[in-house]
Amino acid sequence: MADALIRIYYQVAAFFSALKQYWYWLLLLMLLLAAQFVLNSYVGEFKLPTEWDWVDIVGEGLSALLVLCWLLLILSVRAKGRVTHLFALGLIMLDLALVQDFLDEFIRLPEHIQWDSLLEASPVGLLLITAAFWCWRREQHTTNLYLSKRQHIFSHPSALDKSLHIPDLAYLKHTLLKRSGNLPQWQHTALLLIEIRQFNHLLHQHGSKQADALLLMVTELLLLSLRSNDLLCHYAGARFVIVFSEVQLEQARKLAVELKQNIENFSLPVVGEAQACRLAIDSGLAMGGAASSSAVAVQTLLNQALDDLDENKQAND
């Protein structure tokens, strides 16, 4: 029970901590609600309890409260930007309209006053929210394109390498084992093994912390360069493995060259140094083929990629 209460406390604390950066929106809402109540009280008269309609009171009050919750939830998870501001302003306008409906159940305004009806019927809040959703749709489309290359990763979080947050060697072998059972798919699968050249020298020169940061940046570069149906895994140390799907040998070679160029042409910043670091890589490529068993097929493919990597390293030395 105590642990549950502690978790709830920290979750609530984190929620309100996230809202601190949007204090101005919350202050604006409170000021507008206060002004709205004062204005209604000043120009109108309070109804007797016998005139109250509890069905309308509960329905309209709950609607206003839920819109306020929407506002708090959106502000607690979104970063500052145009979409967030549109959502905030639109929800505030919508909440004011719903609160006016709620106040009408308690306060009777003179018949000649029309601003309350205009506020309740104003579509400004809904228009702003609609604009926010449209902008959010465009934003989400871009995000989906980015995350589509990580769908293989997040679907099996337990198989992630703890340092680079990509699948490890065990998950790679498991994936290859499943593919090898389907011969047509296996024959159109290519394995690219990538190794950062002289990484031990970088480790000695910049230290383990900076070397790990460089590996993370290489991981991001590789993920951005992959197709949505390809898979990136961490083999060991400064080695990465990429599984190309539905490719022929020539296409796999072309993709390998493009990945190599993307990494070697990119300057990676190093903390504390004015000059950026440029990496060189060696690679080994192998194509899937027929084998007597799935386990043999997987090991044969890995060995072929390792042999090709060693040959290329010797040629580059």
Image (cartoon, rainbow, N blue to C red):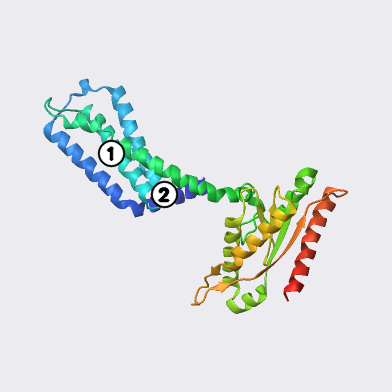
Image position, residue 304 (x, y; %)? 80, 60
Q: Secondary structure at mark 1?
A: helix
Q: Residue furthest top?
A: 50
Q: Is residue 68 left or right of residue 301?
A: left
Tell me which amino acid carries mark 1.
Met
Image position, residue 52 (x, y; %)? 23, 23
Relative to residue 273, is residue 299 depicted above or below?
above
> Which quadrant would the C terminus be assigned to in this image?
bottom right
Relative to residue 123, is residue 162 depicted above or below?
below
Relative to residue 135, is residue 221 depicted above or below?
below
Residue 182 appears anywhere in the view: no
Residue picked out by circle 1: 93
CA gap, disc 2 to disc 1? 19 Å
Crowd tier of the residue under label 2, counting other residues whose Cα lies within 10 Å: few below 14, some 14–19, many 20 or above: few
Q: Residue furthest front?
A: 250
Crowd tier of the residue under label 1, counting other residues whose Cα lies within 10 Å: few below 14, some 14–19, many 20 or above: many
Image position, residue 269 (x, y; %)? 52, 70
Q: Nearer the viewer, residue 39 or 213?
A: 213
Q: Is residue 262 left or right of residue 98?
A: right
Tell me which amino acid carries mark 2.
Arg
Image position, residue 123 (x, y; %)? 28, 33
Q: Is residue 186 left or right of residue 33?
A: right
Residue picked out by circle 2: 78
Badge count: 2
